């Protein structure tokens, strides 16, 4: 590994990047995170996860630091386990986006992440954490769009995720920022202009940290804005092809503690 300046801020995605495939943080990775903070650097988890999926992560890192959740829409304090900042899609835009997508891609089913909860249409097929957790409230479309939300999700039963993303972006990209990260035909939409990069840039500026002093890790298209913004970018070996093509460096896969391997070298 080539010698790099010691970063003042480490930003890492969680699922598929710092976490193993089973959703756990390995002891090696937890120890590497501790090295970052012991060196006086800032550690930020930058994830598509909503805050309600962060309790296990908060515990594993001893409730230290901040997390950028919902692809930049929510800033979450891991110490208090509270949302401290939010950038929401307002109800008017939310209704317009759902109507436009429904008219052009009628097979879509929708769900929303609010600041304090989750709701979904009955046709929305739950996956991953939402199957294990108490399912969100099942509601109709009018209720779904009745209050501002952090993230709007649209699920197609069979379309290729990259193709669906391009379709959604063409239809409503002037209203919201769309991305995807799950491997399913599931598009995640935030308020226009809100990305992992915008939230991370704000946190960095508050700490007088420049992009050149930041190293970032990711694996999926929703990480691309953050990886492009950071002075040094890494993909794990299991990353999406678009991510592998965009980064400065590639480290080992998430199940092989690729993020930890880099941090151990940077913070020796």
Image (spheres, helix red, strand yellow):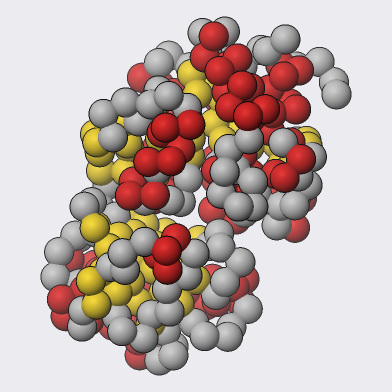
Quarter of the image where one finds residue 89? bottom left
Left or right, 132 with reference to 240: left
Residue at the spot 24% in from the left edge and 58% down from the top edge: 117
Residue nearest the viewer, comparing 15 with 21: 21
Q: Is residue 67 above or below residue 204?
A: below
Residue 227 showing in the rendered view: no
Residue 166 is situated, as x and y percent measured from the top left of the image, at 56, 72
Left or right, 140 with reference to 55: left
Residue 218 is situated, as x and y percent measured from the top left of the image, at 62, 43
The number of callouts visible is 0
Residue at the spot 60% in from the left edge and 14% down from the top edge: 35
Residue 53 is situated, as x and y percent measured from the top left of the image, at 39, 49
Quarter of the image where one finds residue 76? top left
Instruction: State which quarter of the image contains the C terminus.
Output: top right
Residue 14 showing in the rendered view: yes
Left or right, 150 with reference to 30: left
Left or right, 224 with reference to 131: right
Q: Is residue 88 above or below residue 104?
A: above
Instruction: State which quarter of the image contains the N terminus.
Output: top right
Q: Residue furthest right?
A: 1
Q: Is residue 234 above or below residue 90?
A: above
Residue at the spot 42% in from the left edge and 73% down from the top edge: 126
Quarter of the image where one finds residue 135? bottom left
Residue 75 is situated, as x and y percent measured from the top left of the image, at 32, 37
């Amino acid at each position: 590994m080539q010698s790099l300046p010691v970063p003042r801020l480490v930003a890492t995605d969680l699922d598929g990047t710092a976490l193993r495939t089973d959703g756990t943080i390995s002891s090696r990775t937890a120890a590497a995170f501790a090295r970052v903070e012991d060196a006086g650097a800032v550690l930020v988890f930058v994830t598509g996860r909503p805050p309600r999926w962060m309790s296990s992560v908060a515990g594993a890192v001893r409730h230290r630091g901040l997390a950028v959740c919902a692809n930049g829409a929510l800033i979450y304090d891991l110490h208090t386990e509270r949302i401290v900042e939010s950038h929401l899609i307002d109800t008017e835009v939310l209704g317009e986006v759902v109507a436009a997508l429904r008219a052009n891609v009628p097979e879509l089913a929708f769900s929303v992440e609010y600041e304090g909860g989750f709701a979904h249409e009955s046709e929305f097929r739950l996956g991953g954490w939402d199957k294990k957790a108490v399912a969100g409230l099942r509601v109709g479309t009018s209720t779904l769009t009745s209050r501002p939300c952090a993230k709007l999700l649209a699920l197609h039963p069979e379309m290729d995720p990259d193709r669906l993303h391009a379709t959604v972006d063409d239809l409503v990209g002037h209203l919201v920022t769309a991305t995807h990260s799950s491997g399913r035909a599931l598009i995640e939409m935030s308020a226009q202009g809100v990305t992992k990069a915008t939230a991370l840039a704000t946190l960095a500026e508050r700490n007088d940290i420049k992009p050149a002093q930041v190293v970032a890790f990711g694996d999926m298209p929703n990480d691309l804005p953050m990886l492009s913004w950071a002075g040094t970018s890494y993909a794990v070996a299991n990353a999406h092809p678009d991510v592998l093509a965009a980064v400065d460096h590639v480290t080992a896969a998430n199940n092989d503690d690729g993020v930890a391997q880099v941090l151990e070298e940077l913070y020796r």
